[in-house]
Image (cartoon, rainbow, N blue to C red):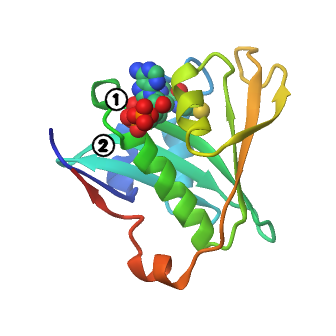
Amino acid sequence: MLNWTIRPAVPADLEALTALEARFPSDRLRRESWRRFVGARSAEVWVADRAGSVAGDAVVLYRRNSRRARLYSLVVSDRCGGQGIGRALLRACEQAARLRDCRELRLEVRPDNATALALYQTSGYRVIRRREEFYEDGSAALLLGKTLEAATISSVRAGNFASSYA
Ligand SMILES: CC(C)(COP(=O)(O)OP(=O)(O)OC[C@H]1O[C@@H](n2cnc3c(N)ncnc32)[C@H](O)[C@@H]1OP(=O)(O)O)[C@@H](O)C(=O)NCCC(=O)NCCS
């Protein structure tokens, strides 16, 4: 099994990020949206880099004067699934949000997305409410949230949200 690294996305990743959107049934981000997200102050795009290719990504959105961050997207390529990459990306997003002084991370997920729900629920997310007709294809979403502990000096020093995994 190859190692991977979690790192911030760069413009050279745009094509791979756009290609990964095929994993979503609707609400796919186009290249233009990725271009806006990568480098935006109000967004962070993290990629799982596996031997130089993008194995997954996650997007966190921030609002000025808000301590609530939003996990806007999380995806891992089909061929790299089940290896802990999704969980590592989620942890990287949580750590990044903490470092921006956020106290909560929220996200939406389809109620029938058992894999993602298992990941979120075993990572400490709770269901806040259901949102009807949330997605472009008319599907409902569950709104989930997790309270984030404040970043400690040691976690900042460790700075290990950009780490390598075996
Ligand atoms: C959800 C997703 C990001 C998980 O990524 P992943 O790298 O495969 O996940 P991990 O290997 O880190 O596993 C994390 C947890 O997900 C769950 N999981 C992973 N693969 C699973 C499977 N085939 N069946 C059921 N649960 C599964 C498990 O709870 C697992 O935890 P465990 O290994 O401790 O049992 C990935 O399946 C994906 O990209 N799906 C399509 C896009 C999507 O639905 N994104 C979420 C939108 S809200």
Which image quadrant for residue 57? top left
Where residue 89 sits in the image (x, y, percent)? Answer: 44, 49
Q: Position of residue 106 (x, y in %)?
A: 71, 47
Q: In the image shown, does 114 or 122 lie closer to the viewer?
A: 122
Q: Amino acid at mark 1?
A: Gly
The yes-or-no answer for disc 1 within 8 Å of ligand 1 is yes
Decide if residue 56 is on the left or right side of residue 95: left
Q: Secondary structure at mark 1?
A: loop
* Residue 54 image label: 2
Q: Going 69% across and 20% down the picture, which residue do you hit?
A: 111
**Residue 118, position in %: x, y?**
55, 29
Exactly how many numbered labels are in the figure?
2
**Does 110 sit above or below residue 69?**
above
Residue at image position (38%, 58%) is 10
Q: Nearer the viewer, residue 84 or 66?
A: 84
Ligand 1 position by quadrant: top left
Q: From this view, report whether residue 107 is shown above or below residue 150.
A: above
For badge 2, the amino acid type reads Val
- Tag of residue 121: none
Q: Residues within 10 Å of mark 1 (few under 14, many from 20)?
A: few
Q: Which residue is mark 1?
A: 81
Depth check, mark 2 against mark 1: the one in front is 1
Badge 2 element: strand
Task: Count residues near mark 2 (Cα–Cα under 10 Å), then give few for <14, some for 14-19, many for 20+.
Answer: many
Q: Nearer the viewer, residue 155 or 132?
A: 155
| Left or right of 89 on screen, residue 134 | right
Callout 2 touching callout 1 (CB < 8 Å): no
Q: Position of residue 1 (x, y in %)?
A: 15, 38
Q: Is residue 43 visible?
A: yes
